[in-house]
């Protein structure tokens, strides 16, 4: 009667771990491709209009941390508070979302304040809290009520 002993090789011991690591690497590469290749970075300029004091804000130049700027799955979004605009009334916050195909969406994150948006063709829209709207090139955003307000024009 023959006596056989099987001693597993290094490959047999590491096979399942290497498959798991390879699958994890593929998932990480697909995620990075999506975040860096598909999500559009913020772009455009906010220019103060009328009596608003301030200077142009280039949305691509707004500095955020390393994670939120490059590796975040929401890197195509930027809020009004991240821009550090000097004359924004208290309690107003907007979220700008830049889509891959060039559209820019504005969502009102303010708890009670409304935002008025005037488009170049003369249309006026009021964005209620929680509401959103597609922002056209040369649109004017009026932030705040009549006494304490500021206006910015968005240029793509």
Image: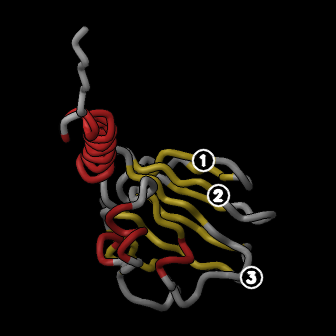
> On screen, 111 above or below 49?
above
Q: CA distance from mark 3 to mark 2?
A: 20 Å
> On screen, 107 above or below 61?
above
> Which label was assigned to residue 108?
2
* C-beta proximity under 8 Å, tags 2 and 1: yes
Q: Residue at x 30, y 70 (%)?
A: 60
Q: Disc 3 or 1, which lies upstream in sequence?
A: 1
> Mark 1 falls on what kind of element?
strand
Q: Quadrant of residue 41?
A: bottom left
| Residue that mark 3 sits on | 147
* C-beta proximity under 8 Å, tags 3 and 2: no
- Provide residue 106's location: percent of width, then percent of height: 53, 54
In the rendered structure, the answer to whether residue 45 lies left or right of residue 82 reads left
Extreme residue in the right direction: 112
Q: Quadrant of residue 110?
A: bottom right
Q: CA distance from mark 2 to mark 1?
A: 6 Å
In the rendered structure, the answer to whether residue 143 lies left or right of residue 34 reads right
Q: Nearer the viewer, residue 33 or 6?
A: 6
Q: Residues within 10 Å of mark 3 (few under 14, many from 20)?
A: few
Tag in front: 3 or 2: 2
> On screen, 121 above or below 71?
above
């Amino acid at each position: 009667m023959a006596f056989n002993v099987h001693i597993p090789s290094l490959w047999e011991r590491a096979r399942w771990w290497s498959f798991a690591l390879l699958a994890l690497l593929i998932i990480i590469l697909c995620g990075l491709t999506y975040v860096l290749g598909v999500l559009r970075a913020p772009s455009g300029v906010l220019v103060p209009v009328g009596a608003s004091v301030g200077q142009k804000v280039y949305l691509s130049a707004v500095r955020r941390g390393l994670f939120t700027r490059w590796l975040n799955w929401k890197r195509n979004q930027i809020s009004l508070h991240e821009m550090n605009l000097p004359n924004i009334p208290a309690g107003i916050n907007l979220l700008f979302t830049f889509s891959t195909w060039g559209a820019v969406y504005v969502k009102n994150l303010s708890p009670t304040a409304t935002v008025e948006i005037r488009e170049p063709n003369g249309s006026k829209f009021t964005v209620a809290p929680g509401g959103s709207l597609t922002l056209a090139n040369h649109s004017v955003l009026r932030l705040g009520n009549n006494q304490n307000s500021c206006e910015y024009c968005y240029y793509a």
